[in-house]
């Protein structure tokens, strides 16, 4: 990991010093699934589901394999979903590089065999980036992140899972001081 790079502490490592890991990753309810594409491991853009109620960051085994991400099979946790189904992770991938526009962060990803997502961004992601979602009357929703490396805040659009018509990079390639046309809320905010 580069010098001055930000990384979050794995929830399981933190929790294991206090009590058992069983049910450590109990997920909260998700009313509407929102997605944001991230450059993962400097390989490709991956649709990621936002879930501030989940206590971990998770990645599917297929996604990790396709991106060339290795994981430690000795660091597993028991997961319990909102509907009560329990499953065990396959292991933990440490310091996985995530990049959105020019913001680079490293996350600890729990690898899951066959989830309904490629990447799930839970509480560790929200805490590291001070993430805030904002809903608009138009039905649009934005995600504001604070870069833990330099304190700069950036706002990005989200999209409903599986319904992206354009790559979000078209929104993220420019830093907006002003938005031409009607205000949408998708612009850069300075700290």
Image (spheres, grey):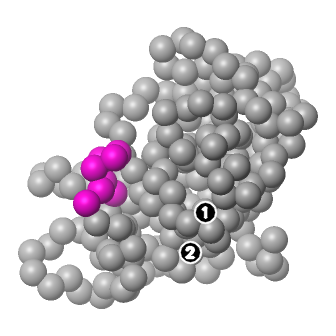
Q: CA distance from mark 2 to mark 1?
A: 12 Å
Q: Which image quarter holds the N terminus?
A: bottom right
Q: Nearer the viewer, residue 99 or 179?
A: 99
Q: Is residue 75 above or below residue 171?
A: above
Nearer-the-camera pick, 184 or 81: 81
- Kindly state the secondary structure of the residue where label 1 is placed: strand
* Residue 172 placement (x, y as % from top left): 38, 76
Q: Which mark is residue 107?
A: none
- In the rendered image, the vertical position of residue 171 relative to residue 12, given as above or below: below
Q: Which residues are magenta?
A: 158-165
Q: Is residue 46 left or right of residue 139?
A: right
**Where's residue 34, x and y in %?**
36, 46
Q: Is residue 177 magenta?
A: no
Circle 2: element type? strand
Residue at the spot x=62%, y=58% of the render?
Answer: 128
Residue 135 rendering spot, x and y as whole percentages: 25, 51
Image coordinates of residue 57 in percent, x first then y, are 63, 44
Taking the image as drawn, is residue 131 in sight? no
The residue under label 1 is 40
The secondary structure that most of the magenta stretch takes on is loop
Residue that mark 2 sits on: 103
Residue drawn at x 76%, y 19% as measured from the top left: 22
> Looking at the image, which residue sits at the far left?
182
Name the residue rendered at 46%, 46% in the picture.
50
**As drawn, is 68 to the left or to the right of 163?**
right
């Amino acid at each position: 990991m580069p010098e001055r790079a930000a990384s979050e502490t794995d929830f399981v490592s933190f929790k294991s010093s206090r009590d058992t890991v069983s049910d450590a990753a109990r997920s909260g309810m998700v009313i509407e699934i929102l997605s944001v594409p991230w450059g993962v491991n400097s390989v490709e853009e991956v649709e990621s589901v936002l879930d501030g109620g989940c206590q971990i960051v998770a990645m599917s085994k297929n996604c990790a394999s396709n991106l060339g991400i290795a994981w430690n099979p000795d660091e597993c946790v028991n997961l319990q979903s909102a509907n009560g189904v329990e499953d065990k992770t396959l292991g933990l991938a440490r310091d996985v590089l995530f990049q959105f526009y020019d913001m680079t962060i490293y996350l600890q990803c729990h690898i899951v065999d066959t989830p309904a997502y490629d990447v799930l961004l839970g509480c560790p992601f929200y805490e590291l980036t001070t993430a805030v979602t904002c809903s608009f009357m138009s039905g649009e929703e934005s995600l504001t992140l604070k870069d833990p490396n330099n304190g700069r805040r950036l706002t990005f659009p989200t999209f409903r899972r599986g319904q992206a018509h354009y790559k979000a990079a078209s929104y993220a390639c420019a830093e907006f001081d002003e938005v031409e046309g009607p205000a949408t809320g998708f612009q850069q905010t300075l700290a």
